[in-house]
Amino acid sequence: MKKIILLFFGLVLTIGANAQFPMAGGTTKKMVTGRISAVILDSVTKKPIDYATVSLIKNKDNKSVNGAVTDERGKLSLSNINPDEYKLSIGFMGYKTKIMVVKTTPERPDLNVGTIYLSPTASNLKEVEISGVAPLIENKVDKIVYNAEQDITNAGGDATDVMRKVPMLSVDVNGNLQMRGSAVRVLINGKPSGTMANSVADALKMIPAEQIKSVEVITSPSAKYDAEGSGGIVNIITKKKTAEGTSGSVNASVGTRSNNGAFNLNAKTGRLSLTTSLGVNQAYPQNSLVRSMNSLVAADGSLSTVSQDGYSKWSRVGYNGSAGLDYDFNNYHNISTNVKINRFSNGGPGSSNVLTNGFPSVNTRDMDMGFNNMDWNIDYRKTSKREGEEFSVSAQLTTGRNTSDFSNRTVFSEMYFPPGGGPGVMLPDVIIDGSNTGKNNEYTLQSDYVYPINKTTTLETGIKGISRKILSAYGESLQDFDYDQKVGAAYGVLGFKLGKNVTAKAGVRAEYTDINAISGHKDKFGHDYFNVFPSAVISQALKGGSSVKLSYNKRISRPSLFYLNPFENKSDQYNVMRGNPELDPEITQNMEMGYSTYIKGSVINASIFYRTTKNVIESAILPIPGTEAEGQRFLTTYLNIGRSQSYGMNVFASYNPKPKWTLMTNVGLNTYEVNNPATNINTGTFLNYTVFGRSAYALPGGWNTEIWGVVNSPKRTFQGKTDAMYFYGGAVKKEIMKKKASVGLNVLNPFSRDLIINTVNKGSNYEQKNNIHYPLRSFGVNFSYNFGKLKFTQPKKGVKNDDVKKEDQGGMGGVQN
């Protein structure tokens, strides 16, 4: 099998090499050619116009020499242009055609025309006034885009707050992210980040909402993407962009729950572009009320219990920064590099009154977790005179150092009397300390090639290699963990038209995984596996801008360090947490049918899906044997519990009852069911749901108001459930300084300080209950300022590692603020 993979990789490399170094066929006279670029915007809304038609015509003979359509950012780029004087003609349905004269010379073959505004026709202008601003939600052919920068209620929050309002996503109080009830892969600007390597939930909390431009939800990724994420892919696009000249933004917010700050700066001169950004986040320590009850019925019918009543007072502080460089050697060769650094700490003290089978004690604890990560990318891209042809090589280095330190002390103030009789004794204090330092190094190299066979058919192919090395050291050497994982992948995707209004894309991805690990005192263990992941999508355009789509794909979710780490976290000695290094990956198959339409300015997107998953990974609560004096302790770990199947649907709609009033809603439903005949697991079928609603109204004088709400259904596992959760808020914003700046007020859950969360897990003869009062209410003031003019360049391709299943919990050892 390995030989087959190597042969496949060799064939793809040969294709890429031929693309970059075509065979010699004689000499040709070198000509100085250049590039003409521009950004096309609506003159009223100042928003990009995608798919605008652009023609380049020679001024002296009126012959057309080149043409293109703008991308989703309104970006236009015409390559291989000989120095001359031309007419640039730009047109789009509903807009007045604009013609302007441009000129390039041998000395200056490249010309950036800058921003070109198209004026709507009279009929189209009325439609523009109805929509008001760019839509908060956009429905693309292969994804749904949530434009976070258009949502004024996000100010002062973090990425977790933003995710709660994204269609098809659900987020619990700790930041656990799911799509349609299944795990997702989270990318930042199309690439993985070391920040996500241990805890996606913690990583989301350290990204200020003001840094997020948009969120892309990809429900049916093609074989070109890594096969990770049974639910799909979530791509967070930040406001860091490459722009002509100098531009940037400053955002700051102060609130009762947290403080955020974000700074972005972009500069470009000629062929060189520089970008930088910095974000900071600080959450105040606040008391979270925590109550729990562990109980077990022994074989003789006796009952053992431990109840805790106390608090956890966690705080959070972190920052993230990045710096990037992009250089065009000429029209066909580009190199770029980017460095991202993230620092984040989370934790705090806690205390509980404990009753162990009725015997009292007091437990005090402290927990501190640190996350330190760096990502470094280098990307090379080569295009050719053949429009759409592209060859790229990308490399990424990710390093991370994560720490966990805890102390736990139990003090007994009363005499203990054994149940069988005898004299009472004063039990000594129980002190437990632990520490863990985990290092995660990841190296990635990939190459991609896009070849347009003809005007209606395009081939995409590529190879990729990933090497992961995890070293985890503890105070107790028997818990040390040494883990190596290597992944090799190759893919091929063919996009083509089946008719005038029907397009299709089909592909296959092959991945080989080899794992070797040593866990403490155990012998070395490991295994390898080979998987083939097909994908297919067919889409038909209907009248009136409507469309229907049918897709299929197969995906994998490999367990990450959070799931695998065998370190026993005893920050709560009665509820110990430990990973399972011998987990198998989840394998998922998805089928989806979607329909989109536009009715008098309203947008409706509906979809139904079916998903089946084997080797489902879920947390499991297991009893730990102990003495009567120790009380009933439980271990939380992770298991492959069986196979699941899920049916579901999602409906998104946007409506304008008045020109400056927008109503929006998103409703998602999916079933939950897990079966395993070998272990006699049969959960039955449950219905999960997520409901989101939003109302936004624009007032005269630059005022904007908005209210929103989210309801997440109870979350099910094979052992129990967590109650439903409700989030709601509002905001008001005023534009100032000629619309370059704004000030605003925002509020989250104003009518209740705490979000009350009840969780119950049951086994055959045991039960665990948790009741948490999480402080969520917040009030905040925010300020933002933009300077310069943004003229976006084409986004560069690079490494996208999408193959590792992330955790379902937002940290260990307590409730996080």
Image (spheres, rainbow, N blue to C red):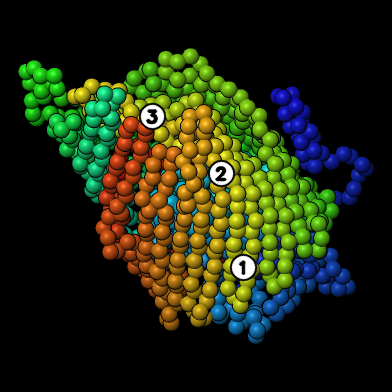
Residue 650 visible to the viewer? yes
In the image, taking residue 94 as reference, residue 263 lies left or right, namely left
The correct choice, above or below, for 64 with respect to 257 in the image is: below
* Residue sitting at x 56%, y 80%: 129
The residue type indicated by label 2 comes to Gln
Please report contact status of discs 2 and 1: CB closer than 8 Å, yes or no. no
- Residue 578, numbered circle: 3
Q: From the viewer's side, name the closer residue of 410 and 251.
A: 410
The residue type indicated by label 3 comes to Arg
Which of discs 2 and 1 lies nearer the camera? The answer is 2
* Residue sitting at x 54%, y 34%: 615
Residue 576 visible to the viewer? no
Secondary structure of residue under mark 1:
loop
Where does label 2 land, which residue?
Answer: 645
Secondary structure of residue under mark 2:
strand
Q: Position of residue 732 (x, y in %)?
A: 37, 71
In which image quadrant can residue 727 be found? bottom left
